[in-house]
Each structure stands twice: as C-alpha cells, then as structure tokens.
Image: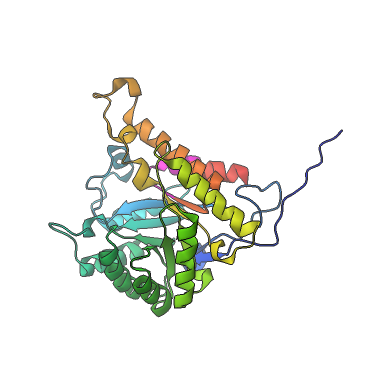
C-alpha cells in the first residue's frame, strides 16, 4: 500500500511579530504547523538567527571569536562586523558591563552604547540586560526611549519587573517586549497574561522560555518549548501563541566543554571546535523543539544553523 501523507495543519497560528524597520526588518512566527514541519504546509517565516555581542566589546570574549572580529576597536565596529556575519538576521547587544558591582556601567553609558550600535547596523536590534531585574528595567526604559522607531526587542521582562518594562518598552515607546520565564509553561502563560492585562498587545510580545546548554538540563528546555507549541497550535491557547526566542550563546560558551583548554583536557580535542559543536547542537535542538529564533556567537555556528534552516524550509 502506498504511503499517503496526512498533513497536520492547525486553525490556530503563532502570532507574527516584526522586528526592525525598513527593508531589513524581519518577522517571527506565523506558523500553522509544528516546528520545521514544512512538509505539512509552507512555513510563512523561517526561524531567524541573531548574533550576540557584549557592551564590553571583545573583552573577555572566547578566543574562538577574536579571529573573526580581527582589529575591531569600538563597539560600533564589533556590531557592524556581527551584522555582516553570513546568516545573521539580527544583532543582540547584551549589557554585561551593567551588572551591579564594582565599576558597573551606568544607565547613561548603556544608552550611549545602544545608540552607537543601532547607528552602525542596518538589521534589527535586540537588547539584552545584565540579568539584574531592577537595573534592567532602568536600562530598558531609557534605551527604548533613545531608540524610538527602531522596533527593538528587549530581553527580558520578568515577573519581578514586568510592570515597569511592559509600561515603558511596550506602551510608552511601542517596542517589543521579551517575556522571560524559568522553563515552566504555567509561568510563561501567567507572564503573558500579566503583560496583556497591562495593555501590551499580544502581537508585541515574544517569549524567552529559558535556556540551557545541551546536556545541562536541556531536556526541560526542549520539553517546555514543545509543550508551549502544542498548546498554542493544537489547543488554540492565545496566551501561548507568541513566538519564542532562545539565547543559546550565553549558555553554551560558558560550560566546561567550551572553557577548558586543550592543555588541561587534551583528550577532548580542539577547544574552539568543542564550543562550536555545543552551540550548534543546542541551537538545532531549540529550533526542532519550536524556537522561532536563536541567538548565537560563532560565525561557524551561524553559518551551519543558517544552512540547516534553509535546507529544511
């Protein structure tokens, strides 16, 4: 008996959210089928890839990235080189230097850097904070104001600061709000409900469901993303139909496989290749689970994941 394919196409869809402005803007979401199931129906918007840079420039960057950025001296030069990386759809600026402590970067400094980065690139920009909720809320408000009209995504609004971030980023300055929860479908839905009750449109919300490197509790991340997509499409849950962005780089380049030198662990092989492999494997698994975008660092990882997405679309 010949095989007869029975497409699984759903009446519900993932919300379409646009980032950036002008000719280089991108759209996330819009799918009516499970992740990468292009054999069931055309997928309106292919998953996107972001390149993460730090406000610290190349300070503390993995050696694996230094060759690509070469003689870049300023954050604007780094941003421009990141935007030119083959396969890159957007740039993610993370404010590592703003974390509270000795020598922390001020909010005013962050605004200045964000404006320099925005001026240097012509693709969409994502702003990630320093992981301190109070400081992030302050940074996001001022940067959102400074970049009015650029349609920037801010990662992330959390339970403890969602009112401040949602009101400033999403309402006052009409930017996109990233809702970050801790690998829990119920917490993700609750945060989306709170943001919409605040007045932020569903079409202006993107979810960051949490992240981890492959092998480091990653099964919880993958299963959570899968459950969110199942609820959004098969059950039509409007509070879980926001696109998903997963920051992969910050997790994969901080685990021992990427950090331990070849001198210390020669049996593990080339250190740079280990980091690249960890980033690729994690990103591919996130996309298969349902991420609409992943954020990476290494040009080899970006090129590989970009080629994978193109082949599957």
Q: Residue furthest front?
A: 186
Q: Position of residue 241 (x, y in %)?
A: 57, 62
Q: Residue furthest right?
A: 1
The quadrant where residue 229 appears:
bottom right
Magenta region, residue range? 295-304
Camera-side residue of 95 and 69: 95
Task: Judge whether 8 appears above or below 27 on screen.
Answer: above
Question: Would you say residue 31 is visible in this rendering?
Answer: no
Task: Judge whether 276 appears above or below 8 on screen.
Answer: above
Instruction: Find out whether residue 144 is within the magenta segment.
Output: no
The quadrant where residue 301 appears:
top left
Q: Position of residue 72 (x, y in %)?
A: 27, 50
Residue found at x 21% / y 70%? 108
Residue found at x 47% / y 65%? 190
Instruction: Find out whether residue 297 is within the magenta segment.
Output: yes
Q: Residue furthest top?
A: 267
Task: Judge whether 134 appears above or below 250 on screen.
Answer: below
Q: Position of residue 130 (x, y in %)?
A: 28, 58
């Amino acid at each position: 008996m010949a095989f007869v394919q029975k497409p699984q196409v759903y009446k519900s869809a993932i919300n379409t959210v646009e980032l950036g402005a002008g000719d280089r803007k991108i759209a996330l979401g819009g799918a009516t089928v499970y992740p990468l199931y292009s054999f069931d129906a055309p997928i309106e918007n292919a998953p996107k890839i972001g390149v993460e840079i730090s406000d610290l420039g190349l300070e503390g960057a993995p050696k694996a990235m230094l060759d690509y950025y070469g003689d870049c001296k300023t954050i604007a030069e780094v941003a421009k080189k990141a935007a030119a990386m083959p396969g890159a759809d957007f740039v993610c600026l993370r404010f590592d230097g703003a974390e509270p402590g000795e020598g922390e970067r001020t909010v005013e400094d962050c605004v200045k850097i964000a404006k320099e980065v925005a001026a240097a690139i012509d693709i969409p920009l994502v702003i990630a904070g320093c992981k301190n909720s109070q400081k992030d809320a302050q940074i996001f408000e001022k940067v959102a104001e400074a970049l009015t009209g650029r349609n920037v995504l801010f990662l992330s609004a959390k339970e403890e600061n969602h009112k401040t971030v949602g009101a400033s980023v999403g309402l006052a300055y009409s930017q996109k709000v990233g809702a970050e929860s801790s690998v829990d479908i119920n917490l993700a839905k609750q945060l989306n409900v709170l943001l919409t009750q605040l007045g932020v449109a569903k079409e202006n919300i993107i979810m960051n469901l949490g992240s981890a490197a492959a092998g480091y509790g990653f099964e919880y991340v993958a299963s959570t993303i899968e459950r969110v997509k199942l609820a959004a499409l098969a059950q039509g849950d409007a509070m879980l139909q926001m696109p998903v962005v997963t920051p992969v780089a910050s997790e994969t380049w901080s685990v021992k496989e990427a950090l331990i030198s070849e001198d210390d662990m020669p049996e593990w092989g080339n250190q740079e290749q280990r980091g690249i492999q960890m980033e690729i494997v994690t990103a591919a698994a996130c996309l298969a689970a349902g991420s609409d975008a992943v954020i990476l660092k290494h040009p080899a990882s970006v090129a590989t994941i970009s080629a994978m997405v193109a082949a599957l679309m």
